[in-house]
Image (tube, rainbow, N blue to C red):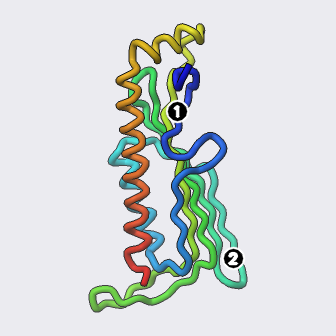
Amino acid sequence: MGKEKHKQIYVVGNKQFYGSAIRQTGAIFDINQLYKAWRKWFDDHKYFLNEKKQSAKQLPDGQEITIEWVAYRKIDDYVKFHILTHVWLMRINDVMVEVNGQKRKMQKADIQIRFKGFLEKDYRGKWKNEKLRQFYDRFIIKKRLINMEGKIWYETNDLINLTKEHVRMMTP
């Protein structure tokens, strides 16, 4: 038995660990622009976005922010895509940066942003007989599931690349 045994198929990360990560020390970026870009990306791709956790605390060396997002999109009655994002920004301080000849307030921070992407099969729990569900996955819709794995991998990596663009845009 292969993947049909599992109801969740991870393409970025796995059940215990996040996959791809963006880490940078001293990154200079606009937190508000990054946040707006993420929101737009999730809206454009029709994901329902749930902010599972957000915390902020002021420390002597700057602010620290932790954000956890859980986003999902129903593909059909059988498959749902999930993208999980964990953001940890440390030592956040405002800095003035010259962009196109104009002074702009941005933030300098140490960042760690991690992502998970997976598809969930039978998310509504319609299949009571697990063996029949596995047969359905393995022989009836196998090609479709493989295509969907590629699609959620692409979408997760598209979000990762968008994040990299915003974070590295201003970093020296």
| Residue 156 is at least partly visible in this image | yes
Mark 2, residue position: 58
The three-letter amino acid code for the residue at tag 1 is Ile
Q: Residues within 10 Å of mark 2 (few under 14, many from 20)?
A: few
What's the residue type where badge 2 is placed?
Gln
Classify 26 as above or below 144: below
From the image, state whether disc 1 or disc 2 is nearer to you. Answer: 1
For the residue labelled by badge 1, is the local secondary structure a helix, a strand or a loop? Answer: strand
Q: Position of residue 147 (x, y in %)?
A: 35, 31
Quadrant of residue 151 in the image? top left
Q: CA distance from mark 1 to mark 2?
A: 38 Å
Disc 1 designates what residue?
Answer: 9
In this orientation, which residue lies closer to the viewer: 19 or 27? Answer: 19
Quadrant location, the C terminus = bottom left
Q: Is residue 172 above or below residue 40?
A: below
Q: Earlier in the sequence, mark 1 or mark 2?
A: 1
